Image (cartoon, rainbow, N blue to C red):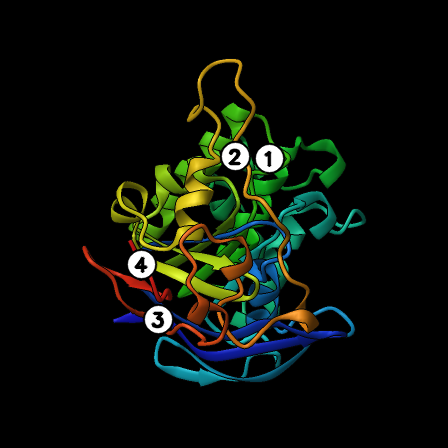
C-alpha cells in the first residue's frame, strides 16, 4: 500500500508555474529520493504538501492522499505527514529546551499530559541516538551541535507518528561523518516503523546510498522515475544521463567537472514541448513542439522523453 500519492500538482509563483503536473506514489517503508538541481521545484513540492508555501506561491491544482486519506496540497498539514528541514537550528525555538519542543506536538496533537509528553520526548531522543537523553532534554538548541540539533528535529517529526516523513536536504550543513549517521538513522527508522521516507537532495551519492526509488526533476516536472539501480546504470532520459555524468569522480583526474550547456528555462518562458529540448543532444524538431508524457521505461520505471535511451 502507498503511504503517499500525489496527482497533477501544479504550483504557481509570480511569473508562471514552478511545479507543473507532478505525480508521485511512495510506498510504506520505502525510501524515495527526489533529485534535481536548485530551483527545479523539489522543496516547493514538499512545502505545498506540508501547507508551508512561501508568500507568492500558490497551489493551482492537485490532489493528494496520505495512507488513503485525501488532503489538499497547500492547505493545513495533514495528520500522518511530517517534515525535517535543511537547517535544523533555524527550525528550533531558541527560547525552549529541546525536550519541551519534542513534547509540544504530543500535548497539542496526541492528548498527552505534560509529564507523559516529557517522558515520551526523552524516549524519542534515545531512539534517534542522543546519549544521556534525560539530562540533555533540559538543554537549549545553542548547546547542541548541528548534527545533534538535526537529531532533535527528527525526534520532533517522529512525535507526530508520521506515516510519511519528508527530509529536505537534512545533511547539507553537516560534516561527512555526521551525514552518514543521519542517513543511516533515517533509513533505519523507515524500515523499522514502516513509514515512507521522501528524501529531497541534489547529492547523487546520498541517493545511491539510501534510496529504493528515485525521481529526477527538471524545470518543475518529473522527467524520469524508477528503481535507483536501473536509473544509475541505464538512465533513459537525456537530462538524467547528463546529471549522473556530472558526478565528481566520473572524469579523469585533473580534468574539469562535466557540465550541461545552457540554462534552465524560467517559469514564464517555457515552450509547448520538452523543457530540456534546447539543451538536449538527442532532441529532434518535434521535441520542442510536443510535450512528453511519463511512459514506461525499459528496465522499469517511467520516462518523459520522445527519444529515450
Helix, strand or loop status at disc 3: loop
Using the rendered view, name the quadrant where residue 30 is placed: bottom left
Residue at numbered disc 4: 308
Residue 122 in percent (x, y) is at 53, 45
**Crowding at mark 4 (Cα within 10 Å: few <14, some 14-19, many 20+):** few
Q: CA distance from mark 4 to mark 2?
A: 47 Å
Residue at numbered disc 2: 130
Residue at numbered disc 3: 294
Along the line of sight, which residue is nearer the eye, 254 or 153?
254
Q: CA distance from mark 4 to mark 1?
A: 44 Å
| Residue shown at 32% from the left, 49% from the top | 235
- Single out the mark in the foreground, 4 or 1: 4
- Single out the mark in the foreground, 3 or 4: 4
> In the displayed structure, would residue 136 be above or below residue 120?
above
Q: CA distance from mark 3 to mark 4?
A: 11 Å
Q: Are marks 3 and 2 in contact (CB under 8 Å)?
A: no
Helix, strand or loop status at disc 2: loop
Along the line of sight, which residue is nearer the eye, 209 or 238?
238
> In the displayed structure, would residue 276 be above or below residue 247?
below
Q: Which mark is residue 148?
A: 1
Q: How many marks?
A: 4
Q: CA distance from mark 3 to mark 2?
A: 43 Å
Which one is earlier in the sequence, the residue at label 1 or at label 2? 2
- Single out the mark in the foreground, 1 or 2: 1
Q: CA distance from mark 3 to mark 1?
A: 40 Å
Amino acid at each position: 500500500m502507498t503511504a503517499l500519492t500525489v496527482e497533477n500538482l501544479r504550483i504557481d509563483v509570480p511569473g508562471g508555474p514552478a511545479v507543473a503536473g507532478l505525480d508521485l506514489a511512495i510506498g510504506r517503508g520505502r525510501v524515495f529520493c527526489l533529485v534535481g538541481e536548485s530551483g527545479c521545484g523539489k522543496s516547493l513540492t514538499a512545502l505545498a504538501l506540508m501547507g508551508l508555501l512561501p508568500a507568492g506561491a500558490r497551489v493551482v491544482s492537485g490532489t493528494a492522499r496520505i495512507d488513503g486519506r485525501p488532503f489538499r496540497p497547500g492547505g493545513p498539514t495533514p495528520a500522518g505527514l511530517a517534515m525535517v528541514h535543511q537547517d535544523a537550528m533555524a527550525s528550533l525555538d531558541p527560547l525552549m529546551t529541546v525536550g519541551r519542543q519534542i513534547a509540544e506536538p504530543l500535548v497539542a496533537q496526541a492528548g498527552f499530559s505534560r509529564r507523559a509528553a516529557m517522558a515520551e520526548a526523552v524516549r524519542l531522543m534515545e531512539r534517534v541516538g542522543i546519549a544521556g537523553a534525560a539530562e540533555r532534554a533540559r538543554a537549549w538548541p545553542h548547546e547542541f551541535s548541528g548534527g545533534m540539533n538535526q537529531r532533535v528535529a527528527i525526534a520532533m517529526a517522529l512525535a507526530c507518528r508520521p506515516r510519511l516523513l519528508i527530509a529536505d536536504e537534512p545533511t547539507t550543513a553537516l560534516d561527512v561523518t555526521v551525514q552518514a549517521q543521519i542517513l543511516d538513522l533515517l533509513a533505519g527508522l523507515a524500515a523499522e516503523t514502516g513509514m515512507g521516507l521522501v528524501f529531497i537532495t541534489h547529492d547523487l551519492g546520498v541517493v545511491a546510498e539510501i534510496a529504493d526509488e528515485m525521481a529526477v526533476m527538471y524545470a518543475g516536472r518529473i522527467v524520469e522515475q524508477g528503481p535507483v539501480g536501473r536509473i544509475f546504470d541505464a538512465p533513459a532520459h537525456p537530462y538524467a544521463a547528463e546529471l549522473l555524468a556530472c558526478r565528481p569522480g566520473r572524469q579523469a583526474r585533473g580534468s574539469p567537472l562535466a557540465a550541461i550547456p545552457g540554462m534552465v528555462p524560467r517559469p514564464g518562458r517555457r515552450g509547448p514541448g520538452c523543457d530540456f529540448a534546447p539543451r538536449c543532444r538527442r532532441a529532434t524538431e518535434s521535441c520542442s513542439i510536443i510535450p512528453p508524457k511519463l511512459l514506461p521505461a525499459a528496465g522499469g520505471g517511467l520516462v518523459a522523453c520522445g527519444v529515450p535511451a
